[in-house]
Every structure is written in C-alpha cells, then in structure tokens.
Amino acid sequence: MTTFKELGLNSQILQALTDLGYENPTEIQLKAIPQVLSSKQDLKAFAQTGTGKTAAFSLPILEQIDANSGDTQAIILSPTRELAMQIANNITDFSKHIKGVKTLAVYGGASIEDQVRKLNKGVQIIVGTPGRTVDLINRRQLKLQNLKWLILDEADEMLNMGFKDELDKILAVTPKEKQTLLFSATFPREVESIAKNYLKNPIEISAGEKNKGTDQVSHQYYVVSERNRYAALKRIADVNPDIYSIIFCRTRRETQEVADKLIGDGYNADALHGDLSQAQRDSVMEKFRNKALQILVATDVAARGLDVTDLTHVINHKLPDQIESYTHRSGRTGRAGKEGISIAIVTSREKGKLHPIERLIGKKFISTPIPTGKEICQNQLLKLIDKVQDIKVNETEISDFLPSIYEKLKDLDREELIKKFVSIEFNTFLTYYQNAPDLNDSEHMRGVDRNSDRGNRRRDDENMTRFFINIGKKDKLNPARLIGLINDQRIAKNIEIGQIEILDTFSFFELDKNYEKETMSAFEGNDVDFEGRNVNVEITTKQRTGQARSGGDRGSRKRTGDRDRGNDRKRSGDGDRKPKTDFGGFGRKRSGAPGTMSKSTFGSDQNPKRRKRI
C-alpha cells in the first residue's frame, strides 16, 4: 500500500500527518498530490464528500510553498465561512512543523479590520469566501500579483449560491501564470462550464464515478402525508436509540421550526442556519462535534463546514430543490470507511423526485415503512438492557446501601425482579405507543387518492405566493439563473425563495407572500429581459407543476425579486402538529416521558433550560 512518504512529501509534513493519525492516502490524495507536485498544469478533480480533498490540494502546496516570503502564494475559495475555517484549520495542522508558514481564513461575519491586520503581517495561504475576498481586493488589502495557486473548492456549491460574479472578479486580478485547481463533489453542467472558462487544458482526475454516491451509504425513503411528516421524523429517531444525525431542511425558517419542535419534545437537538450569529453557529457546531448534541437540524449551506466522521444517519426532512445537493447531504454520513444511512421523508406526490436522484447517485432508494410503536418499544427496550449490561458499578459508594436494598427485595425472585426493573423505564413507552396510529401514507400503500393531498399542499404553501414567468429551458434558464434574475431585481433583503419549476417555455417560482406587490412592481418597473427576451411575471393560483401540463391557466397577472447571495434558498415550514400519541425519545430528561438516553449516555445536556417535561 502506498504511503505519504512515497508521494514525495517532506519530513515536516509527514510528521504532522503522523501526529494527526493519518496512515495512508485516500484515492483522491493518491492521484492529486503527485500530479500537483510534478506539474504546473491546471487540474479538475472530482471526489465525493469526506474523501480527503483538503489534504489532496493543500499538502502538495505546502511542499512547494516559500516560507521565507510573506507574499500570498495560494488562495483557496470556499462557499461558506464554516468550510473556510475548517480548511484553514486543517492546513494549519498540516503545516505546524514548517517554520514561517501562515494560513488565514477570511470570511464575512468577522471583523475585516482584524483580517487586514493579519494580512499585513504576511500570509502565504488565504482561505476565503468569495464575498469577503472581493471586499479585501477592492480595499487593496489582498494582493495577488505573486499568486502561484488558485483552488476552487466545492465549486458546484459556489455556483449554486450565486458566486459567479465574485469568481470572475477574483480571477481577473490573479496572474495568468498560476496553477488553478478545481475540486468538486458533483459535476453538473455549470461546473463543467466554469472549468472550461477558468482552467487551461486541465488534467482531469476522479476518485469514484462523477456525481455518484459513496458505496458506504444506503438510501431509504418513507412516504407520509404532509401532516405526519414531523411525527414520522420522530419515530425514525425513536427507533434508532443511538442515532447521531443531521436533519436537512430547505430553509432557515423550516430549520428553526423543526429544531424548536424537537427541543420542545425533549430531544437533544439544536438548529444551525444563517440567521444565527457566528458565535452561535460556532457553539452549536462545537457541541455537535463533541456529541453533546445528538441531532443537528441544518440548512445545506450551514452544514457545509461541519466535518464529522461518524454520523449514523442523514435525514432529508424535505428533499433539496437541486438534486446535486442530495449528494452533498448524503455524503455527510458513511465517511472514513464507516457505513451510514441517508433517509428521505416524502409525500406521495414527491416520490417522483427520487428517480432523478437515483440516476445521479447510481443507487436505488429502499422503500421503508414508518416504524410502529411496537418496533420502537422493542428497540428501546434492547437499548436499555445494553445499558444495564455495560454500566459500571461503584462498589465503594453503593456498598453501604445494599443491605437495606437486599432486605426490601428479598421476597422477589430473579424473574420478578427483572420484570419490575425493566418496567420502571419501559411502562411509559408501552403506554405512549399503545394506540399509536399507522403513519404510513395510505395513498402510497393502497393507491393514490389525489384530492386528499391537495388540501395538505395548500396548507403547506400558505406563506408563499406562486409566480409564473414566461421563460424556460429553451431560453437556457435553470434554477441558479432564475434565482440570479430574481436577486437582480433587489425586491427586499432576506426574501424567501420557495420551490422552483423550470419547464420548456415557461417556469414557476415561489416567494414570500408578504412581498407580492414589491415583486410585481420590481419586474414591471425594471423592463426586465433575459437572453434578449422580454420577461413577463404573473401571480398564478394554479397548483404546482409536477402535475402541470404545458400551457395551462396562469392565473391573474402581476410580478418579483431579491439578492442575498450567501443566503439559503428559502421556503415556508410545514406547520405540522404533534400527534398526541407520538413523542420524541432520545436524549430527553427523565420525567415521566419515555426517555431513552440520560445525559451520561450521549454527551451532556448543554441547554437544560430549553428542555420541556412531558
């Protein structure tokens, strides 16, 4: 087996890798490191999430960096501040034995003055988000005339977040004679286009098949009615007592709502999204990494910088708007050789969205019934018995109490004692789930009654207004370009963008209903055109496509827009109610509720005031 030493790395780097517990290079490292060391040719590299991309591009750069020069020699662009911080920390660890090498992360949400002061002291490697990098360039504080390497990490996500203009500005001030390295977990057409525009005759390497999911992850789906989505989520958690999971939501609002419900129901959970301050986000991520949290509810963007290797599950509370994002989500589990499970919770009408994802990842989703109360009780009981077997007895402290305990229990035989002991913990579970309903969607299980689901969809969309726009695939429109068009109208800050549907000659999109007038006014007043075609936007009451025929009723006329590039795509939460017969199991405090894990079982309860007794 090839070692890092055989790849041509120096002793300082090898010592750092040994300190970090790195033993052998991964496939992408085996291919990328020798290529970057031996050639100045541009590189286009595909590697799935969790396969060691950071080391693949940073180790060969550290091998060649001039530590005696304070010039910025390498810049790594990352879509989010969390990921930028993670990359910078990794490079600092890799270079800790190389005297004079400095790495700095630059990103929004932190003091730009502090970052400028550090830059002025001389930094060889910059890891930055596109927005803050452009700010520093505009202030003439970031000088790139001596740049040797430009790395685009997670290029697909930077495009999804609308950073193309920033990338163009940064590329424009970099030297022509440099090596550009593009790394991406997926390669949609837009990324291929960026590679064509920014890279010169690149070498292409791949660790695994493009856009395919890792073999370590199995994919399951549960079909529910909209009103039971949250209840199903809790049962999935309850049937897996040792779950350590990220629940992905599409919007910040949905993320916070789901997290608040879980916390209120006693789960050891918290939220991670862009509306939190940097200090709040750092605190939540640190608790999750340390397993003081068992479940993290997050948006796609916020979770990009979270490097956790032993997640048991990734749960899609709702599927992402762009199917490539599913690959990123599922790639958070099944890392470092461990197996993981990616779960999608869908309604009958959303099942069709699984097919293009299956084609993308090269795997089939397994239809799985929502756990019954009996299954949950069985799993929780076995978990309890495992805890009893593994518990360490403090003989010194307990010995004084044992005589009186033995006296009280002397009339019970072994079987009776076990039954009573187990029932103390377990009776609440049995009672709670005794009459628990079947949450599996009857439409999915016994044929589709389409009319019943329509009512649920209207309730789910009550916070959004649906708009028709007269451009589509034939106009080269895609979701990213449509979002950019909406953003260009500058309707309002932090406006929610909901579902987007691109058809051949026209499309539909959803925006926060509170901005209907502003949206219509923006499009009507700006004389908007797209690819030379005049744009017409109208409010429509027609139900979503997915079932839409071409043409069709467009509803009454009106019009849209917003721009906040780093923000998540937004959409209203589902507003589900908690069924009285269902509950959250793991990580809760003991208080009559059927808790499954005490504080000592899985980290500490970091926020006891937010707990709710049931």
Image (spheres, rainbow, N blue to C red):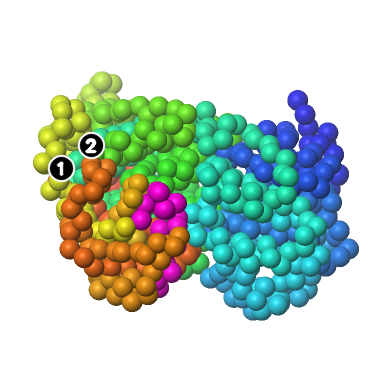
Q: Percent x, y for residue 505?
A: 33, 50
Q: Give the residue pinned by disc 1.
A: 453
User: How many numbered badges does the structure rendering display?
Assistant: 2
Q: Residue 343 lies in what quarter of the image?
A: top left
Secondary structure of the residue carrying tag 2 is helix
Residue type beneath disc 2: Ser
The answer to whether residue 445 of the structure is visible from this angle is yes
Q: Percent x, y for residue 188?
A: 52, 43
Q: Percent x, y for residue 7?
A: 81, 36
Residue 537 or 275: which is nearer the viewer?
537
Residue 437 or 78: which is nearer the viewer?
78
Q: Are marks 2 and 1 in contact (CB under 8 Å)?
A: yes
Q: Residue 254 lies in what quarter of the image?
A: bottom left
Q: Is residue 18 left or right of residue 486?
A: right
Does the segment drawn in magenta span residue 225? no
Q: Residues within 10 Å of mark 2 (few under 14, many from 20)?
A: many
Residue at the spot x=35%, y=35% of the render? 354
Q: Percent x, y for residue 438?
A: 16, 33
Residue type beneath disc 1: Asp
Q: CA distance from mark 2 to mark 1?
A: 8 Å
Does the segment drawn in magenta span residue 472? yes
> Between disc 2 and disc 1, whose residue precedes?
2
In magenta, the rendered stretch is 471-494
The answer to whether residue 403 of the structure is visible from this angle is no
Q: Residues within 10 Å of mark 1 (few under 14, many from 20)?
A: some
Residue at the spot x=33%, y=43% of the render? 586
Q: Give the residue pinned by disc 2.
A: 348
Q: Is residue 264 left or right of residue 126?
A: left
